[in-house]
Amino acid sequence: MSLYKCRNRCGGKWDSGFTLLELMISITILSMIAVIIASVFRLGLGAWERGEEEAEAVQTMRVLSGLVFQQLKSAYPYKIRMDDENVVVFKGEPDSMIFVITLSAPYPGGFKWVHYLHKDGALLYKEGMLPDKELIDTIPGDEELVETDVEEVKFQYYSDDEKEWKDTWEYSDKLPGAVRAQISYFQPIVVDIPMSREAKETEEVRESVIEEI
């Protein structure tokens, strides 16, 4: 016969609460549950913060891609004198571009040059108004920081004459037909340059008129 039964049968009083062992087990279980809940909460909070950071990064890349797209669409075959010949201001490298765009309101009909440069994981930008007699000397240096966390930037340039993509584009008498821009992990964007086609068509018309004369 157990001591508990004996006490009950004998009409004696017995504390019906938790024993010390049961209390210790309960505290241990509650502590484990609290640790698990805290861990789950931390994981959830960390996932949420990472999600916010990724969403912000995606939005930033979208804005940058949109800016590059719009400016390339506005690229203009602006010519300057260089080494005794007139050349279009467009020079491209795998990690940089220099070109001229047309201005909208409040400066319709005006022009400015823009310079993109990817260096040490950051995207840099610089621009200036035209005309500028010291343009070639003005472009390098003092670029403004646009974004510090850009893993990759790669530009390629389509030659209408050679029907192929090139990694570089030197100053010449024309714009590239299109530019392919890879910015970070985003899908590459391909931008047709309208003024390249228009300039080529104008030149073809001019040559045909000269031949007829």
Image (spheres, rainbow, N blue to C red):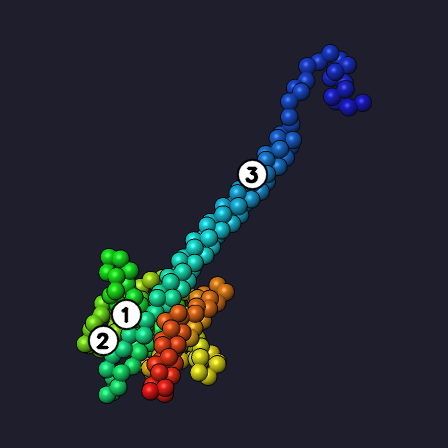
Q: Residue at x 32, y 71 (%)?
A: 76
Disc 3 is placed on an element classified as helix
Q: Amino acid at mark 2?
A: Leu
Q: Residue at x 42, y 60 (%)?
A: 61
Of 205 and 142, nearer the camera is: 205
Q: Which mark is residue 34?
A: 3
| Separation of residues labelled 2 and 3 (CA atoms) | 66 Å
Which residue corresponds to mark 1? Answer: 113
Disc 1 is placed on an element classified as strand
Do the numbered discs 2 and 1 sit on residues whose CB atoms are within 8 Å? yes
Give left or right: position of 41 versus 95: right
Which residue corresponds to mark 2? Answer: 135
Give left or right: position of 190 versus 125: right
Which of pointers 2 and 3 indicates the residue nearer the eye? 2
Q: Residue at x 39, y 69 (%)?
A: 194
| Separation of residues labelled 2 and 1 (CA atoms) | 9 Å
**Vertical arrangement, residue 58 with respect to residue 101, above or below:** above
The C terminus - image quarter:
bottom left
Would you say residue 169 is visible in this rendering? no
Q: Amino acid at mark 3?
A: Ala
